[in-house]
Amino acid sequence: MNINIPNKGSFRLYEYFLYWLVTLILLALAIPLVVFMFIGFLLRAMSNPAKSMGHLFGFIFIILLVAAGYVAWKIFVPYDIGPQTKSVIISQATDFPQAIKDMKEQGILRDITLFRQIAVRTGLDKIIAPGRYDFSGRISFYGIYQKFKNRDIATLMLTIPEGLPAARLAGLLAQRMHIDSATFMTWVFDTANARQKYNIPSLEGYLFPETYRLWYGMSLDQVVGLLVAEFFRRTGELFGSPISNKLTRDEIITLASIIEAEATDIAEMGLISSVYHNRLKKRIMLQADPTVIYGLGGLSRPLNRRDIRLSDSPYNTYKKYGLPPGPINSPGLAAIRAAMNPDSTEYLYFVADGKGKHIFSKTLKEHNAAADRVKRLARLNSGS
């Protein structure tokens, strides 16, 4: 997904000729002319006071012309601030005066008084866009002004993969966007806010996995709003018509998140979905390992029977009937479609075959036999 950011301002070739032309005029003509005019004015004023007023006005005109040339030189002629990128972050318009001071300290601005006057008189200080602004190389006052005016903020591409839990997304946002992870997780499970603002039970499951173009300085509210809005945009057609399998939208997202966690091959999502749908119909516990792991706060090792036995989490689908309280990650469209439209099978079990796919079974006897085959093959492969 792309966010529209105004085009970056840049210098055109003719502008450089203009800048250096002003400089040459200033150096080659204006300064010597002022000196000669001033000497001439003094001599004529002593010999003919009546004409001194005319010469005074001429002298003032030259002074103004030189001053205008000097200001134009300071505004338009680029100067080198070095090859290393220097940045300033603006959170809101009121930060602009401090940003000007920061730019002075970093060597980006050479005259903060002049730049502040330009910004105030043109109203730039009132319309400045929050974000991070990067500067490097040769740049002029005009270039800096245009960067702020065009809202040429630094952006980044952030990819949220399918099946990413909110806890891991929190770390990603903290690393890439400097958003506090603890505050983000508080938002994720603030059910009252989620219901009131977005009409969803929580943010988990509804932060749509996609590649986003974000900008530095975005607030947590802006980031969350963008991700949730993308969820509704991408799933609007899916939930626009009645759901045939009698599950609600939120139950579909919960089931889709389990399918997303279980499936390593998108082609198997419909089959995995059929297993869970069949178990729900027959009131058999789902016995989904990913839900237990989620309830334990995540594991860096495989789930074992002791974990299942000791866990009293509502996400322990080995002990609780039906779906868990909510999604366990952010499912993609394929998983959501599979949850809504499972394959028509009689399967009740599946086991990973160790090669990235699963073996599906109708009975517990078939399932145990398949699990034993997988274990034997694993032992043989580890011993070879």
Image (tube, rainbow, N blue to C red):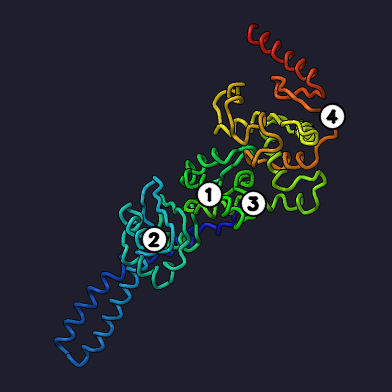
Question: Which amino acid is tagged 3?
Answer: Ile
| Horizontal and vertical percent position of residue 93 | 43, 63
Q: Quadrant where the C terminus lies?
A: top right
Q: Residue pushed farthest bottom?
A: 50
Q: CA distance from mark 4 to mark 1?
A: 40 Å
* Residue 133 appears in view: yes
Question: Toward the viewer: 118 or 123?
Answer: 123
Instruction: Answer with the quarter of the image where residue 348 lies.
Output: top right
Q: CA distance from mark 3 to mark 2?
A: 35 Å
Question: Toward the viewer: 1 or 219?
Answer: 219
User: Upstream in the sequence, badge 4 or badge 3?
Assistant: 3
* Residue 267 appears in view: no
Q: CA distance from mark 4 to mark 3?
A: 32 Å
Q: Residue at x 43, y 57 (%)?
A: 91
| Horizontal and vertical percent position of residue 215 | 51, 52
Task: Identify the mark at residue 95; answer none if there is no mark.
Answer: 2
- Residue underneath mark 3: 200
Residue depth check, mark 2 versus mark 4: number of the one nearer the observer: 4
Instruction: Answer with the quarter of the image where residue 359 lies.
Output: top right
Q: Residue at x 56, y 31 (%)?
A: 296
Q: CA distance from mark 1 to mark 2?
A: 26 Å
- Residue underneath mark 4: 346
Q: CA distance from mark 2 to mark 4?
A: 63 Å
User: Upstream in the sequence, badge 3 or badge 2?
Assistant: 2
Question: Which amino acid is tagged 1?
Answer: Trp
Question: Which type of secondary structure does the marked residue at label 3 adopt?
Answer: loop
Residue depth check, mark 3 versus mark 2: number of the one nearer the observer: 3
- Residue underneath mark 1: 187
Task: Identify the mark at residue 252; answer none if there is no mark.
Answer: none
User: Upstream in the sequence, badge 4 or badge 1?
Assistant: 1
Badges 1 and 3: C-beta atoms under 8 Å apart?
no
